[in-house]
Image (cartoon, rainbow, N blue to C red):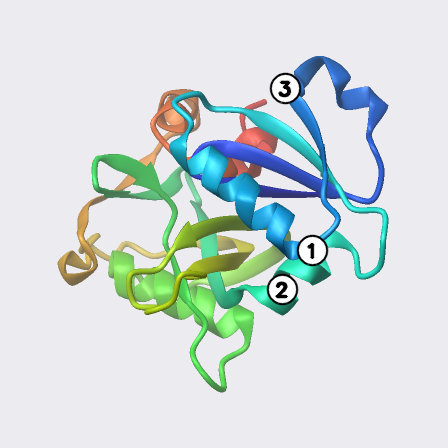
Amino acid sequence: MYKVFFNEHQLLCGTEKNNSLNGNIDQLVDIECFGDFLQLLLQLERSKHVVKLIIVRKQEPDLMSLLKDNLTQIPAAGGLVINERGQFLFIKRMGRWDLPKGRIEAGETPEEAAIREVEEECGVSGLTIKRKLPSTFHLYRSPFIKDENNWVLKETCWYEMGYSGSDPLVPQTEEQIEEVRWVAKEELPAACQKTYGNLKDLLRNYLD
């Protein structure tokens, strides 16, 4: 089952209902066609309440394939960087803590893009990839798509990275990054309260 975020709404996309999630789910939605999904997005766009939904599609293709076939896709990559002191590298953008990430350029592998984006957004170098982390998915409208269906499905490939240098942190201000800082492990819960839902999921295993 894929988890897709739209704003702070959580859309759990699969082929069947997951009974283990019953207590945490606001609604079960059965999708027969892409038009049904668009109507759901419009409803959520107008909603004043954050919800968590299970969205089920039993036919072929599966729901994620249906979305990829009908939405503009933007592949991205980013890094969860941990230094030798066990601190985590965060950026602040538009008042929220975030992790450095960006679009995968033509000819790049996700790993190459993740390292480049961290270097560009934070001013560090000498990063090493330790392991692949789960990808995150989110939906948004693009003002650059001049079409009624201007929805974008963005998949971000994440990598845990190590860093042993001492470069001064330099925010990439042209990307609206206001601050770059190292966050100690004991500060991580507070940072997670001021970040996005998909990153809270990504960081959950580091909170113990």
Q: Amino acid at mark 3?
A: Asp
Residue linked to disc 3: 26
Residue 156 position within the rendered picture, expressed as x and y whole percent measured from the top left: 52, 57
Q: Please tell me the numbered disc located at residue 64.
A: 1
Q: Determine whether label 1 and label 2 are within 8 Å by CB.
A: yes
SS at badge 1: helix
Identity of the residue drawn at 59% across and 26% down: 52
Counting residues from the start of the chain, the first of labels 2 and 3 encountered is 3
Residue 190 position within the rendered picture, expressed as x and y whole percent measured from the top left: 36, 21
Q: Amino acid at mark 2?
A: Lys
Q: Where, quadrant-wise, is the C terminus in this rendering?
A: top right
Q: Amino acid at mark 1?
A: Met
| 10 Å crowding of disc 3: few (<14), some (14-19), many (20+) | few
Residue 4 position within the rendered picture, expressed as x and y whole percent measured from the top left: 58, 44
Q: Determine whether label 2 and label 3 are within 8 Å by CB.
A: no
Depicted 174 relative to depicted 192: above or below: below
Q: Residue 120 is drawn in which quadrant?
A: bottom left
SS at badge 2: helix
Identity of the residue drawn at 53% across and 69% down: 111
Along the viewing direction, whichever of 57 and 32 lies nearer the viewer: 32
Identity of the residue drawn at 63% across and 59% down: 67
Q: Is residue 157 left or right of residue 2?
A: left
SS at badge 3: loop
Q: Where, quadrant-wise, is the N terminus in this rendering?
A: top right
Depicted 147 relative to depicted 182: above or below: below
